Image (tube, rainbow, N blue to C red):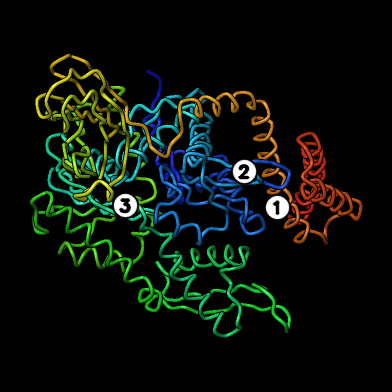
């Protein structure tokens, strides 16, 4: 087995780490960041952008920039959460032929696993650039409260990215694994994970290298995106009342508002006040209109307090499921960027009756835990055993539309459970097994995972045949169901695939298409890297020219200005690799002359 990378595929940002020479390293991407925005965009020329470069151009290319895609993975188009999301994103969410939520960019429809795969591929490339070797094996994390469809869709994304996903583990469990292996203290831990798109609370017992999840709860549609939305809604409402214009109906204005809200949220975690300043946000009968609004930390906390309170309900559920009380908790670990918010830290501390632990980096600890699990699987980390749980109850439909549970939520995985069922009518030749996941009493209120038939049942009065239905959940939380007629020995099994995910044919097609475009993709990557290098050199050259213009010969100034103008023209016109390389080379030559003149002058002064 080669190196196993650990990837935190986040709603807002993603991160990759790897176990090297006895320690975990969090790896910086090609732009130098240790986290990468989970953003994918297509430019007008068809260029695909991933990460920071995609996020930078979101305002001018809002309609074709996909953000927070993780919220859509494994989701049906008509799911209430997706319906709500459709009105708050700048890109178009459309139904696929099978009814799941897909994304339309530049006239083409993409599945969330396919878009997520490009983010995962960026993480894979980051690891390969650092290690200088191919990285195919990975541990990928998901929110603890993800259902089977969402987990399967995440695994599909890994396959599309060219990764062999050895295991999917829950994000809070990964965080606890990272914290526990580095600090080595036994006890009952509460991992409070409030990220960009999801919230999880996990209670986990650490004892002599065994990490046993006692319970988990959460909300897959509660995170930083919702905090941003409340501020956007408030600003939009005030603007509508003052100017009579609804900014949320203008997609570009909405994108600018979202970016400003995110920035203000981040600033208010360390400052007591900030200003939102958006000139030319829109125009009215009298001309351009601007949005300028000061906001204090206390005002912002009043706006989002309801969301913070909403996280405490799952905390109570997790404690109840584990049979624990708040005073049984030895440590509270904060995970996810939203936990930097002082109000979150204060309310968590009040709820658990103890100040939360802030020793871990909330943006990186999940990837570190995933890499730790990779080290365990390679035998590099000894004396560590991870015992996770299934987040939701699994069962089957029985007569009358009743949901009959077979595996209760918070059961330790892997697990296999069997139960005997029978026929409902005389001489019934087959039974249909309807597999569901959820916590409600009726089938209609739960998530359908799969349907399959066991045929060839011998004619018999109803109630006589014995059908053994067996559920198996593997360490990734993925489900396999087997039905066996004990009389005839006939057996049917189904690997439960995401009802709204991709078929094997879809995955094969996408992978084949990616292989066919590999050369183009590599050329595109080279172009992006050259553009980044050119942008950086232009910035430093312009600064140096401003500072040292007085000591430079006129010919050198003209050479630098000419090279700068040509480079800007090449970048603005989105020219190809050779053109950008040529413009960069010319600018480098001019910049060397600039540097020589600068140092010659400094030497003369000395």
**The N terminus - image quarter:** top left
Q: Secondary structure at mark 1?
A: helix
- From the top left corner, tell me how far across and down residue 241 is, in percent: 54, 84
Residue located beneath label 1 in the image: 540
- From the top left corner, tell me how far across and down residue 413 is, in percent: 20, 33
Query: Residue 527's image quarter?
Result: top right
| Category of crowding for the residue at label 1, using alpha-carbon neighbours closer than 10 angstroms: few (below 14), some (14–19), many (at least 20) | few
Residue located beneath label 2 in the image: 49
Above or below: residue 551 compared with residue 410: below
Query: Residue 479's image quarter?
Result: top left
| Category of crowding for the residue at label 3, using alpha-carbon neighbours closer than 10 angstroms: few (below 14), some (14–19), many (at least 20) | many
Q: Is residue 24 left or right of residue 417?
A: right
Q: Which residue is painted at 35% across and 50% down in the image?
A: 361
Residue located beneath label 3 in the image: 335
| Category of crowding for the residue at label 2, using alpha-carbon neighbours closer than 10 angstroms: few (below 14), some (14–19), many (at least 20) | many
Looking at marks 1 and 2 on the same chain, the residue that comes earlier in the sequence is marked by 2
């Amino acid at each position: 087995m080669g190196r196993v990378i650990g990837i935190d595929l986040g709603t807002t940002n993603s991160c990759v780490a790897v176990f090297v020479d006895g320690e975990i390293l969090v790896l910086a991407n090609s732009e130098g960041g240790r986290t990468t925005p989970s953003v994918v965009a297509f430019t007008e020329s068809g260029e695909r952008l991933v990460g920071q470069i995609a996020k930078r151009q979101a305002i001018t290319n809002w309609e074709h920039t996909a953000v927070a895609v993780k919220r859509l993975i494994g989701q049906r188009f008509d799911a209430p959460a997706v319906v709500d999301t459709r009105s708050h994103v700048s890109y178009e969410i459309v139904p696929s032929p099978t009814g799941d939520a897909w994304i339309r960019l530049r006239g083409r429809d993409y599945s969330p696993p396919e878009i997520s795969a490009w983010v995962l591929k960026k993480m894979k490339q980051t690891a390969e650039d650092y290690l200088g070797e191919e990285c195919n094996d990975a541990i990928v994390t998901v929110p603890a409260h993800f259902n089977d469809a969402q987990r399967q869709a995440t695994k599909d994304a890994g396959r599309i990215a060219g990764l062999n996903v050895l295991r999917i583990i829950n994000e809070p469990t990964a965080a606890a694994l990272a914290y526990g292996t580095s600090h080595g203290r036994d006890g009952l831990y509460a991992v409070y994970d409030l990220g960009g798109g999801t919230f999880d609370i996990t209670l986990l017992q650490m004892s002599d290298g065994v990490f046993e999840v006692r319970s988990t709860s959460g909300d897959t549609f509660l995170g930083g995106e919702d905090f941003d939305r409340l501020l956007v809604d408030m600003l939009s409402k005030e603007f509508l009342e003052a100017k009579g214009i609804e900014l949320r109906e203008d997609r570009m204005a909405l994108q600018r508002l979202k970016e400003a809200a995110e920035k203000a949220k981040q600033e208010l975690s360390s400052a007591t006040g900030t200003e939102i300043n958006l000139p030319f946000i829109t125009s009215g009968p009298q001309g351009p209109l601007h949005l300028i609004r000061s906001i204090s930390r206390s005002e912002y906390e009043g706006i989002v307090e309801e969301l913070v309170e909403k996280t405490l309900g799952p905390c109570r559920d997790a404690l109840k499921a584990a049979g624990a009380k708040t005073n049984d908790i030895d440590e509270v670990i904060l995970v996810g960027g939203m936990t930097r918010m002082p109000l979150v830290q204060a309310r968590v501390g009040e709820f658990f009756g103890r100040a939360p632990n802030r020793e871990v980096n909330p943006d990186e600890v999940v990837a570190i835990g995933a890499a730790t699990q990779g080290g365990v699987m390679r035998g590099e980390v000894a004396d560590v055993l991870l015992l996770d749980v299934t987040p939701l109850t699994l069962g089957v439909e029985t007569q009358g539309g009743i949901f009959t549970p077979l595996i209760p939520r918070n059961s330790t995985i892997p697990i296999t459970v069997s139960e005997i069922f029978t026929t409902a009518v005389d001489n019934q030749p087959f039974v249909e097994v309807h597999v569901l996941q959820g916590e409600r009493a009726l089938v209609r209120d739960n998530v359908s995972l799969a349907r399959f038939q066991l045929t060839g049942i011998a004619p018999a009065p109803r109630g006589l045949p014995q059908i053994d239905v067996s559920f198996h959940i593997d360490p990734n939380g993925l489900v396999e169901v087997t039905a066996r007629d004990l009389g005839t020995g006939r057996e049917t099994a189904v690997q439960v695939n995401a009802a709204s995910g991709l078929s094997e044919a879809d995955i094969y097609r996408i992978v084949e298409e990616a292989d066919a475009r590999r050369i183009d993709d590599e050329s595109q990557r080279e172009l992006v890297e050259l553009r980044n290098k050119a942008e950086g050199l232009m910035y430093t050259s312009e600064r140096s020219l401003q500072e040292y213009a007085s000591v430079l010969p006129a010919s050198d100034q003209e050479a630098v200005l000419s090279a700068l103008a040509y480079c800007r023209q090449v970048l603005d016109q989105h020219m190809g690799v050779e053109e950008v390389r040529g413009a960069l080379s010319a600018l480098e030559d001019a910049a060397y002359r600039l540097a020589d003149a600068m140092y010659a002058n400094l030497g003369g002064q000395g």
